[in-house]
Image: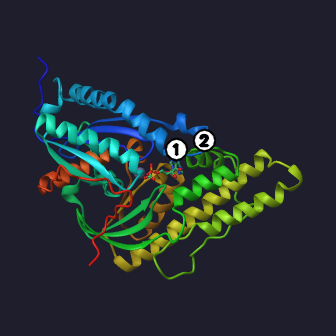
């Protein structure tokens, strides 16, 4: 007979912050299911995320994605799961697109009321920061929150954020440095657009870079000499812009080789800056562990470059699994679990906060 597993400590996590409708179920720090419905195809023709379309799609898909997550988690536990089996419902309250966030929050509240469950409010960036701590459905992973060695240095590299964070314990974060202009993912996306690679550009640019060489053109590395832990990517983006502009005067188009090479050179500059700042932060903070999170970790070149720096200082560095690099509900359920342990529940008047910060300012 197949053994039914316990339904203790189950958290359902919902993320509708941008263009993915995602619902996940965790048991402790183990990810049982991580269902994602992507809207990329819908936004593609507009060259970016259209908030009203994102909202409509979240509304259309959320019930289906919840059912999918329950079904998948049920398969892992060998039992039929329903919302009644959950111990709490965690939801992203920000940062993100206001009208998109509202869809997830409304659904989470509805479920809490109907099934008498506790609500947990999760900051999307805390989700990315801790995403490498999620264990797979078998309960295996490279690192467990239980054995995490502090101080931890966090590096967030997403479409909206580029931040270095000091983490003294889970839930206590201090900002060490951040981008003064564009986020690194945003720079990838904008550069991709300039090179005619469409939306969403970051992933495509990374693919194009594999075919190019950085020997034929060099782009600057902003902030390389600046002693702070802040970043800047707009100068790099502008440099690509003027290079492309000059070459496409008189109606000319870039050759394929130029697109490949510019992608590679952009990548080299962006990764170099991340490496320089990570190294500075390691020297300053002397962390025992580095946790990296956010969509740009999907690039193997980025992971390789950052790992090289940590290795030089003998520090352990961790990245999210591929399904937890870009937006996902699993990281929300995971942070939800940590908050559940601390009994940090939200009120039913929880509101979205499109600009939510992870840091408490004193
Ligand atoms: O963390 P994320 O999914 O959403 C935010 O919270 O912002 O990050 C999205 C960012 C986008 O800028 C996207 O271009 C970038 O992550 N990204 C990548 C790759 N996949 C996603 N950048 C470089 N290489 C990739 N393979
Ligand atoms: Zn994100």
- Residue drawn 15% across and 51% down? 340
Ligand 1 within 8 Å, label 2 CB: no
Whether residue 266 sits left or right of residue 39 in the image: it is: right
- Residue 145 spot, x, y in % from top left: 22, 56
* Camera sees residue 17: no
* Camera sees residue 180: yes
- Residue 362 to residue 296: above or below: below
Which residue has dot 1 on it? 50
Q: CA distance from mark 2 to mark 1?
A: 7 Å
Ligand 1 within 8 Å, label 1 CB: no
- Residue drawn 51% across and 62% down? 183
Location of the C terminus by quadrant is bottom left
Instruction: Name the quadrant containing residue 316.
Output: bottom left
- Residue 252 spot, x, y in % from top left: 86, 49
- Residue drawn 77% across and 48% down? 257
Q: Secondary structure at mark 2?
A: loop
- Residue 108 to residue 301: above or below: above
Instruction: Name the quadrant containing residue 234.
Output: bottom right
- Residue 103 spot, x, y in % from top left: 34, 41
Instruction: Name the quadrant containing residue 37.
Output: top left
Whether residue 226 sits left or right of residue 65 in the image: it is: right
Q: How many marks?
A: 2
Which residue has dot 2 on it? 46
Q: Are marks 2 and 1 in contact (CB under 8 Å)?
A: yes
- Residue 204 to residue 85: above or below: below
């Amino acid at each position: 007979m197949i053994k039914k597993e316990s339904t203790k400590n189950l958290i359902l996590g919902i993320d509708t912050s941008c263009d993915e409708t995602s619902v996940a179920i965790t048991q402790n720090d183990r990810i049982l299911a991580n269902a994602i419905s992507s809207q990329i195809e819908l936004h593609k023709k507009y060259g970016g995320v259209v908030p009203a379309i994102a909202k409509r799609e979240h509304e259309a898909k959320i019930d289906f994605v919840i059912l999918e997550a329950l079904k998948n988690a049920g398969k892992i536990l060998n039992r039929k799961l329903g919302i009644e089996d959950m111990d709490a419902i965690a939801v992203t309250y920000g940062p993100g697109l206001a009208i998109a966030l509202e869809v997830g929050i409304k659904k989470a509240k509805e479920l809490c009321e109907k099934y008498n469950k506790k609500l947990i409010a999760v900051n999307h960036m805390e989700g990315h920061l801790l995403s490498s701590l999620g264990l797979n459905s078998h309960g295996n992973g490279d690192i467990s929150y239980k054995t995490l060695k502090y101080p931890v240095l966090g590096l967030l590299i997403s479409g909206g954020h580029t931040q270095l964070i000091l983490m003294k314990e889970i839930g206590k974060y201090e900002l060490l440095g951040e981008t003064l202009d564009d986020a690194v993912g945003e720079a990838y996306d904008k550069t991709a657009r300039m090179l005619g690679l469409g939306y969403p550009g970051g992933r495509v640019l990374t693919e194009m870079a594999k075919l190019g060489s950085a020997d034929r053109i060099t782009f600057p590395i902003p902030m390389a000499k600046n002693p702070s832990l802040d970043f800047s990517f707009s100068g790099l983006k502008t440099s690509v812009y003027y290079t492309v502009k000059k070459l496409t005067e008189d109606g000319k188009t870039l050759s394929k080789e130029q697109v490949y090479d510019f992608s590679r050179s952009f990548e080299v500059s962006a990764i170099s800056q991340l490496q320089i700042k990570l190294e500075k932060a390691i020297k300053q903070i002397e962390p025992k562990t580095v946790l990296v999170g956010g969509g740009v970790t999907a690039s193997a070149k980025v992971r390789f470059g950052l790992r090289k720096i940590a290795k030089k200082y003998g520090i352990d560095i961790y990245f999210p699994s591929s399904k937890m690099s870009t937006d996902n509900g699993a990281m929300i359920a995971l942070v939800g679990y940590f908050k559940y342990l601390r009994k940090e529940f939200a009120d039913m008047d929880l509101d979205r906060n499109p600009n939510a910060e992870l840091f408490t300012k004193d």
